[in-house]
Image (cartoon, rainbow, N blue to C red):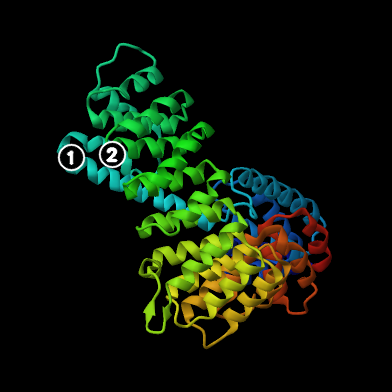
Amino acid sequence: MGNEVNTTAMAGVSGENQVISLMNRLETGNGSEARLNAATELGNLGEPAASAIIEKMEAENPSLGGEIKSYMLLALLETGDKRAENIISEYLGKEEASNAAVADGVQSKGEVPEDIMLAIQAKDKAMRESLARSMTSEYGNDTDLLEEALKAEEQNSTLYTSFVLSNFEFESENETEILLQALKSEKGYVRVSAAMALGQKKEKAATDPLLKMLAQDYPLAGHSAVMALGEMGDERAVNTLMNELKNNGKDYIRSSTAIALGKLEAEEAVPYLIERLRDTRASVRSNSALVLGKIGDETAVEPLKNILESGKDAEGRRKDSLNTGVDVRKSTVLALGGIGGTEATQTLIGVINDEGEIPDVRVAATIALGNIGSPEAVNVLKKTYENQNMNMNVRNGALIALGKTENQEAAEFFIEKIGDKDFGVSAREALINMGETAVEPLIENLKTEDQKIKDETALILIEIGDPRAVEPLIEAYQ
């Protein structure tokens, strides 16, 4: 009897140590394979492991990352413990609330594609850097702080305002009034800084003075006025900006005016932007194309197609050499993806399959097709990725584009690849990013007889955090 008691006690201690060891492996394991194995072994230990997992999660340890929690929840499922349902239900409810909070601050899919927004932001930054270089050329070291503000990744009014305050004599104590007064400073660089500050503050009282600056001041000040007007969102600026886009002799003013009209979402500017697709400067064509994609007017499709056609070789020569550049062509295909529709889709498919096209442009076309996200687009992207003879960068572009679509066929494509040695990690990330679109196909995949695939599927559902997955997860592991 004594020996039996001692053996039982030793077994208990051994079991407890085993749980601790496996929990440590799960938390510190090198890679998903090690963590998945630790989770499976924990699941085999049953109730002792379940209690340890629940205790660990309820401790709310801040160092316990979301990925580790996912593996712990998988282990809890595999224990078969009855407490799993409540724990997982509570966790997925929190994840859904967290995802919704993040989504509130993000542009919704189906509005303006993220790729177009990022391209416009890059153009905006390039224009500010160009203005900063011009400041150096004209004023030397006097404008160092202003140049720093212009080159900053994140724009705000503080640096611009500080520069104004240190270079301008003022009487008022009101910051906005000081900046408005500074628009009349004798120093051009003070006027530039004041304009940029007011734009970032979205101070609409500055609209009329900025419009006057654009019409009467020297070009660099006019450039800053255009950028400020774009930031402020005042529709009163639209007519003047359209006139500048049409008639201003400075290409950098036309370029910045196109972007400003895009920020103002000025649909009435579409004819002016289409006209600028034939501008004498490639930068103006590129910016105008991106803004047309942001606005999404279908009347721009044919002129955008003409850019692609006129930049290609025809009988040994090109109709329009300005349309051969990668920047113009990439902006054009992204714009077609923002507009969408049958004609844009067919044009993009042609670009992807054109071996004579610039590879970067073909990659951009896959992304644009993914933004359209129609069944036809998804089918072409799948075939593009699976085509072993296709350019590898184009294939990878198709893969990334598939992951951005809100399409269950695309989700099913990635689910088929979960167990792929080379592709499994990318498939997992794509499904998590697809979110609720992937939930139903993933739930169906829980019925697989392949235990490892089932575990991977469960992990993805847990990370997506959709409450619809709670009951199917419990049923799959009963």
Q: Residue at x 42, y 58 (%)?
A: 285
Q: Is residue 111 visible?
A: yes
* Residue 239 spot, x, y in % from top left: 49, 37
- Decide which of 25, 287 is in the foreground and name it: 287
* Residue 117 visible, this angle: no
| 312 on left or right of 101 | left
Q: Residues within 10 Å of mark 2 (few under 14, many from 20)?
A: many
Q: Position of residue 419 (x, y in %)?
A: 64, 78
Q: Is residue 353 left or right of residue 260?
A: right
| Residue occupying the point 37% across, 21% down | 180
Q: Earlier in the sequence, mark 1 or mark 2?
A: 1
Q: Are marks 1 and 2 in contact (CB under 8 Å)?
A: yes
Picture quarter with the C terminus: bottom right
Based on the displayed image, in which of its 4 quarters is residue 68 positioned? bottom right
Which residue lies under the disc numbered 2? Answer: 220
Q: Position of residue 385 (x, y in %)?
A: 57, 79
Residue 313, quarter of picture:
bottom left
Q: Nearer the viewer, residue 398 or 292?
A: 292
Whether residue 274 sits left or right of residue 103 in the image: it is left
* Residue at (26, 23) in percent of width and height: 185
Classify mark 1: helix, strand or loop: helix
The amino acid pointed to by label 2 is Leu
Q: Height in image: 3 above or below 153?
A: below
Within 10 Å of disc 1 (Cα), the crowding (few <14, some 14-19, many 20+) is few
Q: Is residue 31 above or below residue 252?
A: below
Looking at the image, how many numbered discs can be counted on the residues?
2
Label 2: state its secondary structure: helix
The residue to which callout 1 is attached is 138
